[in-house]
Amino acid sequence: MATVTRQVSIQDFVAELRKFPAAAFDGTEAIHKFLRETPVEPESLRSYLTWDRQHYTRNLIDKTTLYELMAICWEIGQVSSIHNHRDQNCWMAVPIGRLLVENFHVVHQDIAAGRCEITATETIEMNASHPCAVDPLEPVHRVINPREFSQRAVSLHVYSRPFDTCVVYSAEQGTCGEIQLHYTTEYGRQGRS
């Protein structure tokens, strides 16, 4: 018999997330458990959702010294670059739609030379009842909203210790390099694009 977990508003979600001690963000289980047990009511996200046909959008909801919380909006068929999280932990939940996470193993990387070798390891589906934590030992991945899912999706991302750059990878070209990250909106208002 499946148990039904009550959805909470994004405001209540943030209030609870802010109660976690710093140590909870050092491992992955405590926050992963919180995401499993505290699904967000989709309607409460409305003021944070911005859509763009060309690229997924990164919408900042909350930020402290311990974490940043973002709503990422995915049109049908949008895919992130293969990327890392600067040795920080990441948790993802999908209150609207469903998404795939494709994980990669880094065989070799030389950022200075812009060269790498990566191989795909597994693909998992995220949906409202199945959030995920990025494996700190194999953190390179990409997020995909496949055309065959035929729907927009929104993912909530909690990143431990906020960061503003990451490394992106091309499996086909064997290249990698650092990029700067930006928010599309901040706290429900337009930010830098």
Image: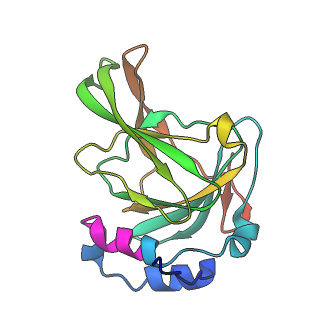
Q: Residue at x 58, y 36 (%)?
A: 79
Q: Position of residue 153 (x, y in %)?
A: 66, 52
Q: Which residues are magenta?
A: 25-34
Image check: 121 left or right of 169?
A: left
Q: Is residue 32 covered in magenta?
A: yes
Q: Nearer the viewer, residue 65 or 167?
A: 167
Q: Is residue 6 above or below residue 135?
A: below
Q: Is residue 137 magenta?
A: no
Give the quarter of the image for residue 140: top left
User: Mainly helix, strand or loop, the magenta region?
Assistant: helix
Occupied quadrant, residue 89: bottom left
Tell me the quadrant of the picture where the C terminus can be found.
Answer: top right
Residue 36 in the image, given as x and y percentages of width and height: 44, 72
Residue 33 position within the rendered picture, expressed as x and y whole percent measured from the top left: 36, 73
**Left or right side of 193 for 24:** left
Most foreground residue, 70 or 93? 93
The vertical placement of 35 against 11, above or below, is above
